[in-house]
Image: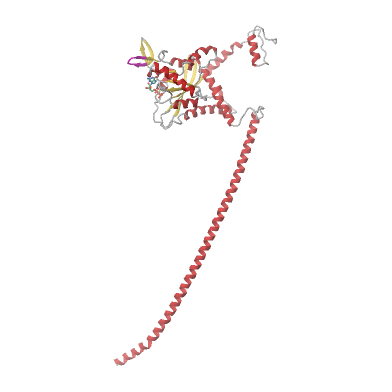
Amino acid sequence: NRGSPSPTDPLLFSECLSQDRKVRALPLSGHVGLDALPDQLVNKSLGQGFCFNLLCVGETGIGKSTLMNTLFSTDFENLESPHFEPRGKLRARTYGLRENGVQLKLTIVSTIGFGDQMNQQDSYQPIVDYVDAQFESFLQEELKIKRSLHNYHDSRVHVCLYFIAPSGHSLKSLDLVTMKKLDRKVNVIPVIAKSDTISRAELHSFKMKIMSELVSSGVQIYQFPTDDETVAGINGVMNGHLPFAVVGSTEAINVGNKLVRGRQYPWGVVQVENGSHCDFVKLREMLISVNMNDLREQTHARHYELYRRCRLQEMGFRDTEPNRKPASLHQTYTARRQEYLREFHGVEEEMKQMFVQKVKRTEAELKDAEEELQFRFERMKRLHQQEKKRLEEKRRILEEDMNSFNKMRAAVELLQAPSFSTAGKKDKDHKK
Ligand code: GDP
């Protein structure tokens, strides 16, 4: 069996040559069971089940919940959203669905209060934050030493259905800004909601207008892949029908003795699953039956890859050194550690200098304050001495005044004393 590849198998041979020159294609002389590999994969996938995460972006009341119920033919728990949220937010709910033995773990994330605020400048932010947070938690799991990706609940958003209001005019700037912010992070599929509320002619020109606005604003919506020849035909045609004009309803209505899902109007019934009434079936086919796996793969290989690359670069990892030599994880880690230590020492030195400067400044301030206090003390002391001197002088003058007064009083008393005794004698003589 080690001979050269069979000349009857030229395709296999050339494929092997072009992919890897070291691989030699060998013919098998008997059945070995390689053809059971796809079955093994199918069985494993069926056992594990699938997971799909769908994000619905659109204003309150545009028909997001109704369309989800219609798409998956079930009644998801739908809580009515208020119109008065101060800031838009998202609500995620996970459900287990099963069809013909195939299990799907479906997460539906829906915007609440999107675009309801007067200031719609940052309305897209909670959505972008949510998408990034799911990428980040997957990245953190991947970076763990003990990873458990096999039972990890992968919440990365696989598709974003962007609900456009059926105005018939043009896209709102909020729609363009939000889709632009999302297009590099998630597969965006725009849909015209409640398309039964505008006429067919209007719908046609509305679709064209939307597509030209998306192209001129550089918004990259998801394109159904045309590289797999089994689906290239249908996907190519469906790309031309974007954005899908959808109608949602879970109400069963009797039309020609048949129960169909639709919306009843006085003039007739809009049938959800009738291709000439709306694009609901096209959306369901493209989203679930044909391209669900591609949406999952694109999320991992394109959007998550971009997020991961940017985050690892931010963390300082790189595949090549500046001299273009490949850098191993260990080298990158060592280089990054040294860079960090250098930065750390730089900051430490800077802080030390700042501390010394601060101490010096405080010392100088304290010295100034002390001098100021000393100066004030001296001045008060001087004032106090001057005041003391003044008071002593006043006291001396007062004492002098008192002395001279006392002297005068003594003199006066002396003068008055003899006259008083003479008068007393005269009195006594008179009585006798
Ligand atoms: P959400 O807030 O975006 O989830 O909107 P809902 O799904 O709760 O729908 C809001 C209202 O719009 C409900 O009364 C639905 O019956 C109605 N509605 C939903 N889809 C359609 C549709 O395709 N056409 C029309 N005419 N009404 C719809």
Residue at screen point 50% across, 63% down? 380
Q: Is residue 289 above or below residue 180?
A: above
**Quadrant of the rendered image holding ligand 1:** top left
Question: Can you give x and y, in whole percent of width and height, for residue 28 in the image?
Answer: 65, 9
Query: In which quadrant of the rendered image does the N terminus lie?
Result: top right
Asked whether residue 160 is in view, the answer is: no
Q: Nearer the viewer, residue 38 or 14?
A: 14
In the rendered image, residue 5, in percent from the top left (x then y), is placed at 67, 9
Q: State the residue at coordinates (62%, 43%).
A: 349
- Which residue is depicted at the point 46% across and 73% down? 395
- When asked about the image quadrant of residue 204, the answer is top left
Which residue appears at 50% of the width and 66% of the height? 384
Viewer-closest of 427 and 157: 157
Quarter holding the C terminus is bottom left
In the current view of this chain or complex, which residue is farthest to the top?
Answer: 8
Prevailing secondary structure class for the magenta stretch in the rendered image: strand
Q: Tell whether position 266 is magenta.
A: yes
- Where's residue 2, x and y in %? 70, 11
Magenta region: 263-269
Q: Nearer the viewer, residue 100 or 248?
A: 248
State the residue in front, 258 or 87: 87
The residue most toward the left is 431
* 414 shown above or below 238: below
Please, is residue 296 above or below residue 357 in the view?
above
Residue 46 falls left or right of residue 191: right
Question: In this image, 99 relative to 6: left or right?
Answer: left
Q: Position of residue 154 (x, y in %)?
A: 52, 24
Does residue 57 belong to the magenta stretch? Answer: no
